[in-house]
Amino acid sequence: RPWVVTMALPRRTLGKTGISVSVLGFGASPLGGIFEDIDEAEGVRAVHRAFAAGINYFDTAPFYGATRSEKVLGQALKDLPRSEIVVSSKVGQYGNPHTFDFSAERVTASVHESLQRLQVPYLDIVLCHDVENVDLTQVAKEAIPALAKLRDAGLVKAVGFSGLPLKMFTKLLDLVEPGMVDMVLSWSHCTLADQSLLTLMPHFQAKGLGVISASPLAMGLLTNRGPPSWHPAPESLKKACAAAAEHAKNRGVDISKLALTYALRAGEVSSTLVGMATSDLVDANVRNARQALGLDPNPNAQLEEEVMKEVEEILKPCQGQTWMSGRPEN
Ligand code: NAD
């Protein structure tokens, strides 16, 4: 069917890749049912709704819901014009049982499997997923060169890696050959509660890398619903975020809106990925993003500015607090 994109969101180029991504991206981990069970048909509608609202960038991984996210996203993407979307997936981390494998052979096979599940002939972006869990030398010397070969063959357009600890990014970038990596994805470090990604931006920019920031809601911490039971944050941070959400609610403001507004205005990342699996959440996030970016008028702007400051004050004692992820040396 013909697709009508009814709204436009600003786009930014991802480093030197020439790939243009909407500043708000669709995070598909919820399509794997990892936050709560999902209605797959509704998930497909959510992807279509996002595309119609100007979101062109869709991120998934074989790990999310042990391939379920990729399959549901694939159901939706097959109806969209391939040249008008940016499809991103990952390699090296798998679910059920939870394993890591960054050997050249496995990551190469993994990309082919993702192409099948996503029902696309090529991936725009492929990332080594949560590399802090493994030997970074193997990622630099095996996984990334294997992905670069797939890039040479035209099966992927851009290669990168993702993870939580910020020191891992500089460590791995020092290990890879120049020109191998196009971009990085950081998560939960460009939020109302943790702004530490911004300190690394000059380093990434100097290397000409594209930067994606994921989890502006800190994987549910900055929502009224709160985080899933498996959320790895320390109790002190969970409590502070819950208190911030409660305060905002009492003032008539949704903490998720403040959190998205903060993320979209901070730093110079190419795109911010928000996880969503329903059309209602897509509508809410697009509406919030458009107001945050000044594309639509915001009748509550003044109140939200005030509450933003109050919430930042509540979160101040925890600012930058993170949690252990992967091998301590990474
Ligand atoms: P997020 O911070 O985007 O939070 C997602 C949660 O917030 C979900 O439970 C969702 O239902 C809920 N939510 C979304 N919009 C909302 C709204 N307006 N109001 C209330 N609740 C709302 O966390 P995320 O999903 O983990 O991150 C976004 C995406 O980034 C992921 O889906 C994934 O694609 C990517 N990501 C990648 C990595 C990695 O590579 N290591 C890590 C984290 C995230």
Image: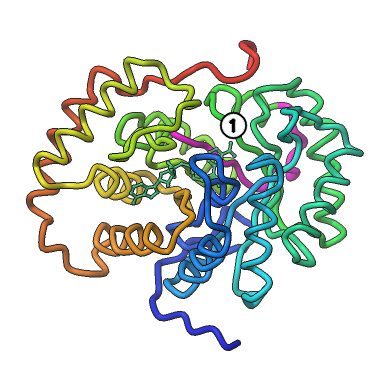
In the image, farthest residue toward the bottom? 2
In-front residue for pair 90/267: 90
Q: Secondary structure at mark 1?
A: strand
Q: Is residue 27 left or right of residue 287?
A: right
| Residue visible at 30% across and 35% down in the picture | 192
Compared with 157, 216 (above or below) is above
Q: Quadrant of the C terminus?
A: top right
Side of 326 where 154 appears, left or right: right
Which of these two is toward me, 160 or 312? 312
Picture coordinates of residue 80, whole percent (x, y): 62, 75
Instruction: Tell me residue 148's x, y (percent).
Output: 81, 48
Q: Is residue 266 magenta?
A: no
Q: Which residues are magenta?
A: 175-188
Residue most extreme to the right: 105
Q: Image point 57% across, 88% down: which residue?
A: 2
Q: What's the residue at 45%, 49% (across, down)?
A: 274
Kind of residue indicated by mark 1: Gly
- Taking the spot 87% from the left edge, 50% from the top edge, the residue there is 149
Instruction: Tell whether circle 1 marks a residue whose Cβ is less than 8 angstroms from ligand 1.
Output: yes
**Where is mark 1, residue-wise?**
163
**Image side of residue 127 versus residue 226, left or right:** right
Residue furthest to the top = 328
Residue 287 vertical placement versus 227 (above, below): below
Q: How is the image coloured?
A: rainbow
Give percent across and percent down for residue 139: 77, 30
Q: Quadrant of the N terminus?
A: bottom right
Q: Is residue 74 left or right of residue 102?
A: left
